[in-house]
Image: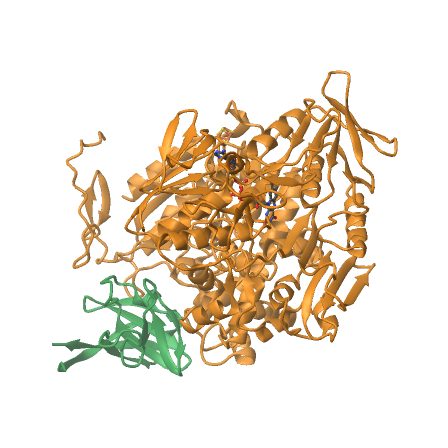
Chain colours: A orange, B green
């Protein structure tokens, strides 16, 4: 039977993935789907749950996609399964099924100690748990976590971020006993304690003692220690939620979980189980990747496929309290006769261990603490020959990088989405030529992202050389050209092309070099030979429009403007018969100016106190702002003041592409800062900085980079971010693509501009200081200089004749180019809805 | 192919008004002409961008492609051979080229009109 009614119990990560998988395999909608969910919100990314404390909102964690033919009932837990009548029961009613899928996940295991049910004792599993923890932490000082595993350390970090003095109690003699070996755990402990989290290892918790207000006050340990703890998180393990299955008489695994075979089917062949609640051949998996694999298998079976669960990769890589920890394969070396190779570097505080077969030829598993760069390659090599000599793989510089090419076809490159090297190679052969294409085509790298460096290496290994040559005149990339110009102190294009290029240049390399020279403080962009490098926008300091006329955008920092200045703009527009429009960047664009009018227009604007808005340049455009704490009853900081200060600081900075920014006065984010290259959102105590957003063709939200910064910390980070971008990005590469293409991504960026890992910060700071000091208004400089002014004529032999090709008609009371609305043969649609006229 | 009528020479401006590798527009007999000075010499083509119909070619970036002197339309960046007027990106598209010379420090243009 293919088709009918499927009921899914649970809308967690795996339940949602099952629905996605079924929908994509069943385009005709033969299966009708009902999802019954206990939680009050649709599926969200539980793996990134802790990001909630970093300011990531619940909406951003959303994983749910609505589909036709799928109904979702939130806050309606299933209370019983009737296998004879084939229906499930909730408080609201009964739902018949042809096929039932259990995706109920796990619950936190709370050890039966005294006081475990006191208020102030929490588990760490749902968004509601986190909201409650945040609420309770308010005004409290100390916190403790029971459990020093992966979840416990994540919870400890959360408590630390909430401002609590935090300790961790772990029954085993080391942290992360499941994943990490003794030496690795020792290294991890040093990192953790350095962050101020105290570890109590090898000791059991015997009770939670109430404080004076009746809520949690202290933890009592088996060795008699009493630990202050106003808030307690229990992270002592998880238990599969198999209670419905047990009550319905389904088979369960030896350690719990709904017993299923490798097709996901339980002892009742109309009932399947997927995710953490399932015990596949008796084993439960507490990770999302095996759950996703199960969801795909069951969806495939429902449409008549023959997929089976391939067994799970329990490899993990995490960043815990800022420390990379990875563990994969036989991490503890339990295979008989196996050999260890270990590497400990107390100076850089990196620990690594590889477990090899007895003949030292096959990689069995390993542990990495402090630097997990080699993880993707190593994990993919488990069970196969070593891709390089062990030490070469472990030494941080080697990072296993060059080794990806040696992986066997069957090696799993992306374990989150079950993508093998073979899959990647096939996609490359099919025409995928870069990482974004591979992501779109194979899904590899779209979940945790740790395999992205390997995707790049596989592209290299397949011989997909993305030529770095800028154009036919220069064989190097923009970044290399930047370094050449800087290191050799080159100040002219002609010298640069003579010494480092060939030919005469073109519309690609000339503006790039002009921008590099400008970034390095090259004087006015229209001086001498520089003028010939600029594209027409920079050459006339205005934006070329479709009819050959230009538009003019004066700077309005932060979008704040006095009535007097507004009136001047209105008068200028009226006197020169310009079309006016408010832009998306909170300023006013004046369209339809001829080149010979530009100096006269700017004379008026400059006299009224305006300056160039650089709308024509690959440069900082605007820093938008909401009205912030000055007026808004929700505002917590002066967003307008900051936006103006930032816009004035970075105005005129030439870059590989345009740069946009915005500042919001509180978390409501009215300024849409997260769609900007750098966005700032006010917090109670400072500013959160987001980097790498953009609108446009591929919209992207900026990522949270740093939290609760003071204004000066914020400005230092932005200075470095911008200067590093100006130096190293490719031509026409926005910051988002630049960060995405960077080896190590946002983490690498952080190491460069926060931790100064390349020793560059002083130089970047100095470069920005030079920019700020040397800024002057390009338009004022033109007006003051007859030689520069002479360019602004329509005709060299008839300076007084206006360009006759520029003519206008009137539309909605304003001039617009003739033919602008309906250019000849294309498919532009007339906008005539018979709407009422706007009064003018 | 079209036949070409050659008209007489017009004096346009002093050579010093043409910057190296940067075009200017001139009005010659009511026609808009784009004039260029490169290290290889002087060039004149129609100012009208045949792709968009806007009079902008004089404002494009001057350069070279495989040794050929070029200008790129500032609107959609198609590249034209300054010697012939042929578009190097779109087969079959071309702009009219005109004759240009320098006499005693003055730039002169003779229009060619296609019929
Ligand atoms: C803080 C944290 C960090 C994690 N980090 C990682 C990590 O780095 N890597 C990794 O691989 N995994 C990680 N995990 C584990 C990962 O989140 C789980 O493996 C994954 O969520 C399992 O998905 P699931 O759908 O099986 O269960 P869940 O996501 O828990 O979803 C089960 C859903 O079913 C609902 N439900 C239960 N019973 C009923 C009922 N009777 N009726 C209706 N609904 C019901 C539950 O309310 C829940 O919403 C982490 C988990 C947490 C909590
Ligand atoms: S972001 Fe906050 S401060 Fe700014 S306008 Fe919106 S609600 Fe007000």
**A251 over A311 or under it: above or below:** above
Quarter of the image where the C terminus of chain A is located: top left
**A101 over B94 or under it: above or below:** above
User: Which residue appears at 19% of the width and 49% of the height?
Assistant: A829
Question: Looking at the image, which residue sits at the far right?
Answer: A224
The residue closer to the viewer here, A312 or A729, is A312
**A318 over A61 or under it: above or below:** below
Residue A759, can we see it? no
Q: Position of residue A67 (x, y in %)?
A: 34, 43
Q: Position of residue B113 (x, y in %)?
A: 16, 76
Residue A200, can we see it? yes
Q: Is residue A573 left or right of residue A713?
A: left
Q: Is residue A174 left or right of residue A819?
A: right
**B91 over A545 or under it: above or below:** below
User: Which residue appears at 51% of the width and 60% of the height?
Assistant: A418
Q: Position of residue A376 (x, y in %)?
A: 61, 63
Question: Looking at the image, which residue sits at the far top?
Answer: A213
The total of numbered circles placed on residues is: 0
Q: Position of residue B23 (x, y in %)?
A: 35, 69
The residue closer to the viewer here, A799 or B104, is A799
The residue closer to the viewer here, A188 or B85, is A188
Q: Is residue A592 left or right of residue A62?
A: left
């Amino acid at each position: 039977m293919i088709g009918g009614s499927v009921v899914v119990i649970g809308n967690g990560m795996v339940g949602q993935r099952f629905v996605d998988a079924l929908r994509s395999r069943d385009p005709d909608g033969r299966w009708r789907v009902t999802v019954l969910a206990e939680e009050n919100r649709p599926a969200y990314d539980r793996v990134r749950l802790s990001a909630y404390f970093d300011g990531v909102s619940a909406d951003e964690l959303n994983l749910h996609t609505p589909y036709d033919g799928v109904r979702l009932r939130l806050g309606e837990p299933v209370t019983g399964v009737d296998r004879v009548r084939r229906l499930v029961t909730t408080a609201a009613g009964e739902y018949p099924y042809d096929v039932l899928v259990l995706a109920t996940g796990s619950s936190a295991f709370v050890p039966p100690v005294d006081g475990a049910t006191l208020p102030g004792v929490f588990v760490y599993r749902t968004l509601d748990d986190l909201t409650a923890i945040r609420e309770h932490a308010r005004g409290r000082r100390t916190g403790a976590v029971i459990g020093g595993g992966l979840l416990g350390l994540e919870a400890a970090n959360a408590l630390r971020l909430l401002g609590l003095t935090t300790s961790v109690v772990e029954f085993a003699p080391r942290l992360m006993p499941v994943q990490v070996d003794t030496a690795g755990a020792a290294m991890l402990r040093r990192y953790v304690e350095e962050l101020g989290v105290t570890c109590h290892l090898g000791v059991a918790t015997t009770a939670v003692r109430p404080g004076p207000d009746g809520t949690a006050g202290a933890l009592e340990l088996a060795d008699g220690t009493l630990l202050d703890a106003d808030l307690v998180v229990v992270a002592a393990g998880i238990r599969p939620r198999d209670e419905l299955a047990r009550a319905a008489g389904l088979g369960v695994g030896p350690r719990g979980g709904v017993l299923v075979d490798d097709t996901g089917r339980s002892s009742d062949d109309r009932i399947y189980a997927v995710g953490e609640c399932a015990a596949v051949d008796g084993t439960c998996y507490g990770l999302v990747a095996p759950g996703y694999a199960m969801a795909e298998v069951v969806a495939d079976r429902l449409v008549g496929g023959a997929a089976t669960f391939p067994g799970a990769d329990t490899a993990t890589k995490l960043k815990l309290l800022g420390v990379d920890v990875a563990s994969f394969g036989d991490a503890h070396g339990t295979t008989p006769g196996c050999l260890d190779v270990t590497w400990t570097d107390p100076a850089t505080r990196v620990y690594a261990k590889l477990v090899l077969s007895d003949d030292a030829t096959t990689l069995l598993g390993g542990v990495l603490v402090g630097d997990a760069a080699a993880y993707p390659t190593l994990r993919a090599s488990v069970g196969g020959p070593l891709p390089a000599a062990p030490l070469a793989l472990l030494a941080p510089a080697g990072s296993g990088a060059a080794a990806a090419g040696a992986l066997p076809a069957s090696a799993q490159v992306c374990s989150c989405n079950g993508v093998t090297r073979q899959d990647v190679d096939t996609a490359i052969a099919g025409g995928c030529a870069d990482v974004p294409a591979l992501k779109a085509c194979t899904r590899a790298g779209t979940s945790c992202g740790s395999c992205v460096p390997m995707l790049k290496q596989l592209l290299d290994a397949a011989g997909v050389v993305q030529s770095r040559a800028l154009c036919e005149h220069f064989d190097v990339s923009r970044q290399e050209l930047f370094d050449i110009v800087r290191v050799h102190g080159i100040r002219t294009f002609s010298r640069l092309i003579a010494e480092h290029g060939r030919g005469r240049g073109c519309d690609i390399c000339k503006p790039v070099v002009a921008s590099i020279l400008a970034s390095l403080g090259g004087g006015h962009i229209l001086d001498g030979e520089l003028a010939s490098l600029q594209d027409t926008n920079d050459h006339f300091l205005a934006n070329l429009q479709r009819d050959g006329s230009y538009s003019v955008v004066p700077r309005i920092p932060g979008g704040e403007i006095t009535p007097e200045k507004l009136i001047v703009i209105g008068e200028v527009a009226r006197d020169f018969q310009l079309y006016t429009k408010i832009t998306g960047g909170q300023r006013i664009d004046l369209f339809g100016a001829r080149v010979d009018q530009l100096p006269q227009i700017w004379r008026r604007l400059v006299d009224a106190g305006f300056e160039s808005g650089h709308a024509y340049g690959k440069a900082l455009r605007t820093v938008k702002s909401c009205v912030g704490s000055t007026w808004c009853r929700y505002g917590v900081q002066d967003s307008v003041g900051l936006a103006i200060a930032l816009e004035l600081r970075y105005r005129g900075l030439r870059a590989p592409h345009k740069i946009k920014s915005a500042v919001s006065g509180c978390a409501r984010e009215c300024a849409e800062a997260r769609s900007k290259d750098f966005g700032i959102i006010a917090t109670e105590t400072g500013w959160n900085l987001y980097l790498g957003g953009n609108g446009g063709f591929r919209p992207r939200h900026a990522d949270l980079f740093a939290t609760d910064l003071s204004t000066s910390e914020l400005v230092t980070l932005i200075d470095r971010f911008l200067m590093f971008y100006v130096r190293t990005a490719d031509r026409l590469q926005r910051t988002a693509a630049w960060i995405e293409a960077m080896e190590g991504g946002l983490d690498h960026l952080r190491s460069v501009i926060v931790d100064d890992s390349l020793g560059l910060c002083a130089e970047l700071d100095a470069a920005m200081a030079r920019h700020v000091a040397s800024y002057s208004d390009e338009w004022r400089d033109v007006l003051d200089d007859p030689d520069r002014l002479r360019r602004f004529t329509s005709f060299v032999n008839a300076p007084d004749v206006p360009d006759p090709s520029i003519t206008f008609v009137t539309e909605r009371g304003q001039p617009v180019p003739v033919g602008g609305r309906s250019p000849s043969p294309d498919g532009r649609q007339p906008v005539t809805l018979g709407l009422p006229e706007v009064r003018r | 192919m079209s036949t070409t009528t050659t008209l007489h020479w017009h004096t346009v401006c002093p050579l010093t008004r043409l910057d190296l590798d940067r075009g200017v527009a001139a009005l010659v007999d009511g026609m808009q002409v784009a004039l260029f000075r490169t290290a290889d010499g002087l060039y004149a083509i129609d100012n009208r961008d045949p792709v968009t119909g806007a009079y902008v070619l004089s404002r494009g970036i001057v350069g070279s492609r495989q040794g050929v002197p070029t200008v790129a339309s500032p609107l959609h960046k198609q590249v034209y051979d300054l010697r012939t007027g042929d578009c190097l990106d779109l087969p079959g598209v071309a702009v009219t080229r005109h004759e240009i010379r320098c006499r005693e420090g003055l730039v002169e243009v003779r229009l060619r009109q296609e019929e």
